[in-house]
């Protein structure tokens, strides 16, 4: 397939509603969502996507009932164990992004171990956003820049000129291309404090499908919709043709 997005990001939404429709507790939906995660990874790697990123747990999600937060954390830890062989088999590199200082030390250790074990993967990078928010990312980047300025002043050096490129190098996604396509499931049409800086020119695709029901055919539809879009990045259509 040509013109496959290099970086696809997914806001996996609707697990709770999916469970409720079945008269089950919310964690039942999250468990079912874990299966959709594995299928989406395999499909994206097959399609030649270079980066697949998933919004798995937002900064705001810490305010959910304790049982749900704990259940989600246990599910992440289990996913690390269950999915490692598939990641290795498919040449997929795993990385977690977010404020991991808020996670249990044992989960962080599992995450770091999976990152080290899969670092050899070159086919696709899977980025899981955990304890992440776009505003947190923008703020922590500003703090890093302020720190760099302080160090420059102390060393009697000029402060680094603030450019979009320099700023992006302080974000938690430094070195990762911005998402080309953002998919959000479950009918909600908002960005929910996700990659605010990085989605400046991202194409958005919304589907009513709830995340636990999201399958290859749904993913293929999203990619096809992306391929129909005309991305102009603020230029005119004629300028894009000339490029
Ligand atoms: C949003 O649905 C989903 C989440 C907050 C959690 C996503 C987590 C998984 C799919 C589990 C596995 C993840 C990995 C990376 C292994 P919601 O609970 O907000 O649904 P609702 O809007 O219907 O209530």
Image (spheres, rainbow, N blue to C red):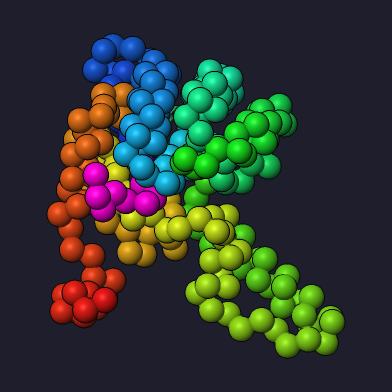
Which quadrant would the C terminus be assigned to in this image? bottom left
Q: Report ligand 1 position as a quadrant.
A: top left
Q: Give the range drawn in magenta.
A: 1-10
- Residue 4 magenta: yes
For residue 127, side relative to residue 40 (left or right): right
Rendered location of residue 43, percent (x, y): 33, 32
Residue 173 in which image quadrant: bottom right
Q: Is residue 156 visible?
A: yes
Between 226 and 144, the one nearer to me in the picture: 226
Please, which residue is most extreme toward the right here? 155
Q: What residue is rendered at 46% in x and 41% in y?
A: 124
Between 141 and 61, the one nearer to me in the picture: 141
Residue 203 in which image quadrant: bottom left
Which quadrant would the N terminus be assigned to in this image? top left
Number of callouts? 0
Rendered location of residue 154, percent (x, y): 84, 81
Above or below, 76 relative to 229? above
């Amino acid at each position: 397939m040509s013109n496959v997005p290099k970086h696809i990001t997914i806001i996996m939404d609707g697990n709770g509603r999916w469970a409720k429709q079945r008269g089950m507790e919310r964690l039942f939906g999250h468990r079912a969502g874990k299966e959709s995660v594995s299928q989406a990874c395999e499909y994206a790697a097959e399609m030649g996507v270079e980066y697949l990123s998933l919004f798995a747990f937002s900064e705001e999600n810490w305010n959910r009932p304790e049982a749900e937060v704990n259940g989600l954390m246990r599910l992440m830890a289990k996913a690390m164990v269950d999915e490692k062989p598939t990641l290795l088999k498919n040449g997929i590199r795993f990385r977690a992004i977010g404020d991991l200082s808020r996670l249990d030390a044992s989960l962080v250790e599992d995450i770091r171990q999976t990152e080290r074990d899969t670092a050899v993967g070159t086919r696709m990078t899977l980025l899981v956003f955990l304890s992440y928010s776009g505003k947190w990312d923008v703020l922590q980047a500003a703090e890093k820049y302020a720190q760099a300025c302080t160090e420059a002043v102390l060393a009697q050096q000029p402060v680094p000129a603030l450019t979009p490129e320099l700023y992006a190098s302080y974000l938690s996604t430094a070195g990762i291309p911005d998402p080309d396509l953002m998919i959000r499931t479950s009918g909600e049409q908002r960005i929910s404090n996700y990659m605010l800086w990085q989605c400046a020119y991202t194409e958005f695709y919304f589907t009513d499908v709830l995340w636990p029901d999201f399958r290859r055919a749904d993913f293929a539809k999203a990619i096809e919709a992306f391929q129909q879009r005309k991305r102009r990045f603020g230029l005119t259509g004629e300028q894009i043709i000339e490029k």
